[in-house]
Image (cartoon, rainbow, N blue to C red):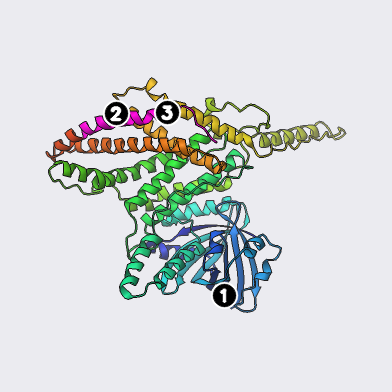
């Protein structure tokens, strides 16, 4: 069976309100104690599969879960068991059979969960949802991780029902989107427990425990995209958006201290950096797929820039204090004290802000509900590439796909024929099935066309821009960064392509332009503090001279970027 559910973390301050909200109608409470199994090498976790035996009240249930069609959906296979005996023979002939037959090592108990669930069902206009408030712990050896989350599982109707009620609860109780399943958290906890067990004395064990805290909540970096060559452009965009969303949510969760609030602070400037990379990847992808795929609505795209700017303000200050100020101090700048985030919201404040969390949830909603057909017609294999760059900035999301339009026309025609009189014979309209081209090379060609255009804009930048304008350098830096992110999408579609030579030169240019941007940001900062901190004049002079040197280095790096991209 297929399971569709949305999970939101419930902060301690909201727990009583969430429980009260559930108890407005008749609720039930059940104890859920589960044992999760995997090999010592985590073979199931690497395949994104989880197997558990769970005592649900007085009944044992064996469950296997594996990925479904989108971020909310999982394939779930449930079997009642007379006792806590794991029976893998139940999966013969199921989609899980192949993965289980490949296991090189035997399964073993990896971690457990001990959960109390308060739940009830609620009807909405678009479906019936089971709302479950789970509290308890995930346990691996002597390690425990708290659980406090509310799940909205679709019982019947449209997935829209999940988001309809989820958005309401998120705003009302200030909940936080958490894309991690209990099995993902348990797997990570089991890894930490195994590493700690390897320590042979108390001092080593304490040091290992500290390092495992850093590893468990380490900043979540970008991962390679995986795009099916048969995917439409919209399906490809949904796929890469899901990866970006996971990167953003994981880092936002650490900044929000989902697991650790009041115990240990794990959010660091690097979490902000990686979160912003996820957001920049999104903006690059939207630009790349404009005119090719359905995009999120304009308001969602506009809000990204707002949240990116808010996190960016904290990131710029952190970078300057950590990297630029030490260089200035070494160069002779008088000592000055600047407090981080003294005049604005902290990354933690922004991460838990309901406006930011609502934006994340709306982006998740788009990835689940958006149609998989494209707003442009598929092109046969032997046609020339479609010229889409002219509509790159158009609002393609306002266009309707051909299929719904044709269906509406057929409905209207059929209705019209029935009103002509009962004696009139109805002439049915049949819409033929048009097969998609095999391998969908059109997406590859369209992406190459756009990447080639972007590369020309980069190498010809100074033909239309003024080198005396620092903003022109910043614009070029953004183009280079956007190109690098877009190339990651192309590599996800064609993993065997050879872009290493081009990417190496692009990365070298990006590093120089990034350093130039850091120094320019610092110059703006110190220029604004010359009245209150006279020593800031030293920084202004030193940074002004340094910027001129960096401009020449950036110009030189730009000359090494090839005029044409070679994809193989």
Q: Which residue is mark 3?
A: 458
Residue range in magenta is 543-568
Dot 3 lies on which element?
helix
Q: Is residue 301 visible?
A: no
Compare marks 3 and 1 and give the one earlier in the sequence.
1
Q: What distance separates the C-alpha of mark 3 from that of mark 2?
A: 16 Å
Residue nearest the observer in this picture, 426 or 276:
276
The furthest residue to the right: 423
Q: Which residue is mark 2?
A: 552
Among the 4 quarters of the image, the one containing residue 10: bottom left
Q: What distance separates the C-alpha of mark 2 from that of mark 1?
A: 68 Å
Q: Which residue is mark 1?
A: 55
- Residue at 77 percent of width and 35 percent of height: 414
Label pair 3/2, CB-CB below 8 angstroms:
no
Residue nearest the observer in this picture, 88 or 400:
88
Q: What distance separates the C-alpha of mark 3 from that of mark 1?
A: 60 Å
Above or below 19: residue 540: above
Residue nearest the observer in this picture, 32 or 552:
552
The furthest residue to the top: 463
Above or below 308: residue 155: below
Q: Position of residue 321 (x, y in %)?
A: 24, 46
Graded by Cα atoms within 10 Å as few (under 14), some (14 to 19) or many (20 or more), the crowding at tag 2 reads few
Label pair 3/1, CB-CB below 8 angstroms:
no
Dot 1 lies on which element?
strand
Observer-side mark, 3 or 1, equals: 3
Graded by Cα atoms within 10 Å as few (under 14), some (14 to 19) or many (20 or more), the crowding at tag 3 reads many
Among the 4 quarters of the image, the one containing residue 108: bottom right
């Amino acid at each position: 069976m297929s399971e569709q559910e949305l999970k939101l973390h419930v902060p301690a301050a909201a727990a009583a309100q969430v429980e009260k909200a559930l108890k407005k109608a008749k609720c039930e409470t059940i104890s859920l104690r589960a044992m999760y199994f995997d090999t010592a090498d985590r073979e199931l976790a690497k395949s994104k599969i989880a197997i558990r035996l769970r005592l649900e009240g007085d009944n044992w249930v064996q469950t296997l879960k594996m990925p479904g069609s989108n971020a909310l959906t999982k394939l779930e296979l449930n079997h009642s068991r007379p006792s806590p005996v794991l029976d893998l023979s139940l999966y013969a002939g199921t989609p899980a059979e192949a993965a289980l037959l490949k296991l090189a090592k035997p399964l073993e108990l990896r971690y457990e969960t001990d959960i109390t669930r308060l739940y009830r069902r609620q009807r909405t206009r678009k479906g019936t949802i089971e709302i479950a408030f789970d509290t308890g712990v995930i346990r691996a050896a002597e390690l425990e991780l708290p659980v406090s989350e509310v799940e909205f599982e679709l019982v019947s109707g449209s997935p829209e029902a999940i988001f309809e009620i989820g958005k309401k609860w998120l705003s009302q109780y200030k909940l936080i989107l958490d894309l991690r399943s209990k099995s993902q958290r348990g797997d990570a906890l089991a890894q930490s427990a195994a590493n700690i067990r390897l320590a042979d004395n108390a001092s080593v064990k304490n040091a290992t425990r500290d390092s495992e805290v850093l590893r468990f909540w380490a900043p979540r970096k970008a991962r390679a995209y995986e795009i099916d060559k048969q995917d439409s452009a919209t399906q490809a965009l949904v796929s890469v958006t899901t990866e970006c969303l996971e990167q953003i949510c994981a880092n936002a969760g650490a900044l929000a201290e989902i697991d650790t609030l009041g115990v240990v602070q794990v959010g660091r400037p690097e979490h902000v950096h990686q979160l912003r990379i996820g957001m920049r990847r999104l903006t690059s992808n939207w630009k790349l797929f404009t005119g090719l795929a359905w995009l999120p609505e304009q308001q969602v795209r506009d809000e990204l820039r707002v949240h990116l700017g808010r996190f960016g303000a904290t990131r710029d200050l952190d970078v300057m204090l950590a990297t630029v100020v030490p260089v200035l101090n070494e160069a002779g700048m008088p000592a000055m004290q600047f407090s981080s985030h003294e005049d604005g919201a902290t990354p933690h404040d922004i991460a838990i802000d309901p406006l930011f969390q609502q934006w994340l949830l709306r982006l998740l909603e788009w990835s689940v509900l958006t149609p998989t057909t494209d707003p442009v017609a598929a092109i046969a294999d032997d046609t020339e590439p479609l010229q889409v760059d002219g509509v790159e900035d158009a609002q393609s999301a306002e266009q309707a796909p051909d299929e719904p339009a044709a269906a509406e026309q057929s409905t209207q025609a059929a209705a019209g024929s029935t009103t002509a009189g009962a004696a009139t014979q109805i002439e049915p309209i049949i819409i033929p099935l048009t097969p998609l081209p095999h391998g969908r090379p059109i997406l590859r060609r369209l992406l190459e066309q756009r990447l080639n255009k972007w590369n020309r804009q980069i190498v010809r930048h100074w033909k239309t821009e003024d080198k005396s304008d620092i903003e022109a350098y910043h614009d070029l830096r953004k183009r280079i960064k956007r190109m690098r992110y877009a190339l990651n999408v192309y590599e996800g579609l064609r993993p065997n392509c050879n872009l290493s030579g081009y990417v190496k030169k692009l990365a070298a240019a990006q590093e120089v332009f990034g350093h130039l941007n850091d120094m320019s940001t610092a110059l703006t900062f110190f220029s604004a503090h010359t009245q209150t901190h006279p020593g800031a004049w030293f920084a202004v002079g030193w940074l002004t001279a340094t910027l001129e040197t960096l401009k020449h280095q950036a110009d030189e790096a730009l000359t090494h970027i090839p005029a044409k991209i070679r994809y193989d």
